[in-house]
Amino acid sequence: MSVTATDGFDDPAYRDGIVDLLGLLGLGELTGFERMAADAGLAPTLADKAALAGMAVTEFHHFEHIRDRLGELGASVDEAMAPFRDALEQFHANTAPADWLEGLVKAYVGDGIAADFYREVAEEVDPLTRQLVLEVLADAGHADFAVERVREAIAADSRVAGRLALWARRLVGEALAQAQRVAVDRDALAVLVVGGAGRAGLDLAEIGQLFARITRKHADRMTKLGLSP
Amino acid sequence: MSVTATDGFDDPAYRDGIVDLLGLLGLGELTGFERMAADAGLAPTLADKAALAGMAVTEFHHFEHIRDRLGELGASVDEAMAPFRDALEQFHANTAPADWLEGLVKAYVGDGIAADFYREVAEEVDPLTRQLVLEVLADAGHADFAVERVREAIAADSRVAGRLALWARRLVGEALAQAQRVAVDRDALAVLVVGGAGRAGLDLAEIGQLFARITRKHADRMTKLGLSP
């Protein structure tokens, strides 16, 4: 795949924004790999362990696609990911799951919100980038797996639902705090969404609608888990 | 690949031994995946993190090969792995690395000894099983990676060498304790090595030579790391 000027890459600010986007997404996949692999260690059965390990491996292969694409853009994946390391590490340090169920809820709720955000941003970028973003967001079966296990646990002990609902709320709060930090720090990425010199973007009303869509989809996921949003 | 009687599978004890062997090896690869993924979380740089994550993924693909082969033998991978879960979990619980370097030494030294043992056992089994065992033991580059990082750390601070040499000795002690437990518990596996009703195996002198070879290769690895055996 070659980069053509018509994709918008003749604008250095646009290219920087895409490198930022892929850096953030790549680090998300790499830490997603780590987190799912760690959750596999909490699995109650060897079958669950192997299933979760397999999903972690899919995340790593997504990371490899992003690394390859950054290479095509002449960017180093390590450098592209570096600006987001603190925010992601802080998020994970503040939301370390205490058990198997918290890990499943975290992956489902957290990855769900992140994926909704990336899909929104994908609407604003060139077709090749969009295709890559949508491809690496494809769910490896983790969502159904998490929903099934969490619902089973609630059926066995209804008190689990209250604890996990609180946990999900804490996750969303932490995710927003770190997302705001990234938005403030990384102009190039923010410009992809809100526009900037010579580039159209979302206006304030559209940003409001974007948040409303992401919030609604989050509530749908909570309902699927059997938790009050 | 089909199973033919000429491979020795007409003997139920032989088949049980192979299922045990593949179960142990499969669980070793799956926990190796988990452990390397966890070590990736301790990596000092994103490049090291991605490198180690990639090696973890290779271990998982090895696990998949073993699972497929067990399926061909009509055995469930979960059931085949289950008898070894306690021993492997106990080993890892007793040898949780305190830092990045201890994790590298553990993987290099521990996997090295395990691989030497499996290679010895592979000499005693049918060609198809032997080929699979040798294939999944192929190093994914982890050995060179570990040697390089450990030697750099010793060059930067020679006191590291003493601490890591003690650590390696503890690893070997724990590994032997768990291996003995497995040998006592799993007759079918032991029979593959030492023989049994209707099957030749190693005699006592040959077992002594086997241990001597494994010990010598362990000493070679320690020297490569820059540690006294």
Image (cartoon, coloured by chain):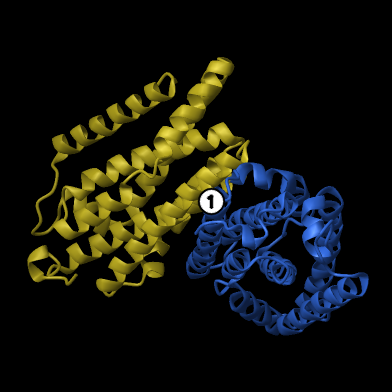
Chain colours: A yellow, B blue
> Where is residue A155 drawn, in percent x and y?
53, 16
Q: Quadrant of the N terminus of chain A?
A: bottom left
Asked whether residue B100 appears in the rendered view, the answer is yes
For the residue pair A26 and A92, the one nearer the viewer reads as A26
Residue labelled with disc 1: B72
Label 1 secondary element = helix
For the residue pair B61 and A200, the one nearer the viewer reads as B61
The amino acid beneath tag 1 is: Glu
Q: Quadrant of the C terminus of chain A?
A: top left
For the residue pair A226 and A46, the one nearer the viewer reads as A46
For the residue pair B142 and B210, the one nearer the viewer reads as B210
Return the chain for callout 1: B
User: Does residue B23 appear to the left or right of A148 in the view shown?
Assistant: right
> Where is residue A86 drawn, in percent x and y?
47, 56
> Where is residue B183 drawn, in percent x and y?
84, 55
Residue at 55%, 71% (x, y): give it: B140
